[in-house]
Amino acid sequence: MRKLKDNILEVGAIDWDRRLFDQLIPLPDGTSYNAYIIKGSEKTVLIDTVDPTKTEVLIENLIKAGVDKLDYIVSHHAEQDHSGSIPDILTIYPQAKVVTNPKCKQMLIDLLCIEQESFIAVEDGQTISLGDKTLQFIYVPWVHWPETFATYLKEDKILFPCDFFGSHLAAGNLFVEDKATVYEAAKRYYAEIMMPFRSNIKKNLEKISGLDIEIIAPSHGPVYNEPQFIIDAYKDWVSDNVKNEVVFAYVSMHHSTAKMAEYFVDALIERGITVKQFDLVGVDIGRLAMSLVDAATVVIGSPTVLTGAHPVAAYAAILANALRPKARFASIIGSFGWGGKMVEQLTGLLPNLKVEIIEPVIAKGYPKQEDFTALDNLADKIYQAHKSTGIIS
Ligand code: FEO
């Protein structure tokens, strides 16, 4: 249990040892499921709950905090890492009402089988008084599910945005201490979770810009007592600006594609382009996702396996397509033995990317001089493409 301010406590759980989220997202630094108790002069509210694996920690913290009567549970988001303990909390505090929006209410009924009569549905902008404190609800849809909203605690100027602005970072300190570490974790989180909804997040940033915010208390990672730090970072990430960077993700079986990769990356570096290279075997997809936040160009390298792309390269393409980075250009390099449809298959996996495909370079067998010349040409075209966008002067 950690104190934000008088009568405002963090009562969630730190999950130091979790290493995977959604059986997909690596958590190198663990995570936390922040939940908050606000004690008003008349009513007490719990802001979100915790992952079901940590329900006991939440209950112990509520006991420690002396919460013998709970009036409201605000549920900002139906995903179970924040909503999963609601049924148990309702068992302990049967008089509590779940305060949420109509969309989230239906999702909580569908996912957690919570009874209809347990809810109070609130509209965008609606307020609820706790006596000396006032909760104002602000719809911020698609961060990162359709039902998401935030709560602004007016008197204390605290925004509780749930996943929005969060970071998968287990830390004992409640507030941000090491900005560089939190920036890295928050950018990784944005890349993995929020990037597909960049345009919605832009609108939501504008929507909250009118609030006087002193503290942002998200549901994962440290609390921001200098909120402009994370607001400015988000403004940069959601902007349309790209950087003079190529994300190059490849896999090789018998070193033909690897030799091309080595030559191609050197060619890009010689032209002053920053390269972020990933061998896709055993890659940390969080780092790969993070690199996609800013890059102007994405290039995938693959050999041909049974007439198609290497499945690991296809996985990278599917992931990039799902994350919808703002990259403007893409290409493919790789090799084949006797034929195949590797290029068509990979480009077909990228329909969500609004990119211009720069002509791929595919070698027959081990790369030869004409292939290295083609790789130089590809590097030249990428340089010219970056120049045309104004990111190289
Ligand atoms: Fe942290 Fe979308 O749940």
Image (cartoon, rainbow, N blue to C red):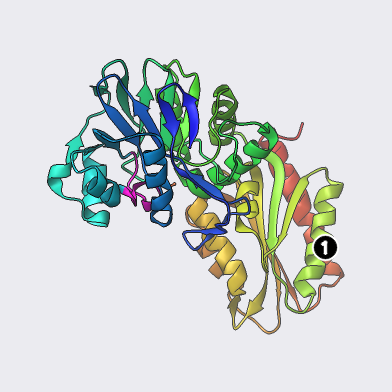
- Asked if the magenta segment contains residue 238, the reply would be no
> Between 345 and 62, which is closer to the camera in this rendering?
62
Task: Describe residue 48's horizontal placement relative to residue 346 as left or right.
Answer: left
- Residue 144 in sight in this render: no
Mark 1, Cα crowd under 10 Å, few <14 / some 14-19 / many 20+, is few
Residue occupying the point 48% across, 56% down: 351
Residue occupying the point 83% across, 54% down: 267
Q: Quadrant of the C terminus?
A: top right
x, y percentage for residue 36? 40, 34
SS under mark 1? helix
> Between 165 and 272, which is closer to the camera in this rendering?
165
Task: Describe residue 253's horizontal placement relative to residue 346 as left or right.
Answer: right
x, y percentage for residue 255? 79, 75
- Residue 12 in sight in this render: yes
Q: Amino acid at mark 1?
A: Glu
> Between 89 and 50, which is closer to the camera in this rendering?
89
Residue occupying the point 23% across, 33% down: 71
Task: Describe residue 112's horizontal placement relative to residue 167 as left or right.
Answer: left
Residue 282 image-quadrant placement: bottom right
Q: Which residue was labeled with disc 1?
A: 262
Where are the magenta residues, as a range?
A: 76-85
1 versus 262 height, above or below: above
x, y percentage for residue 200? 41, 36
x, y percentage for residue 315? 56, 66
The number of numbered badges drawn on the structure is 1
235 versus 288 height, above or below: above
Residue 209 image-quadrant placement: top left
> Between 165 and 197, which is closer to the camera in this rendering?
165
Q: Residue furthest left?
A: 117
Dominant secondary structure, magenta: loop
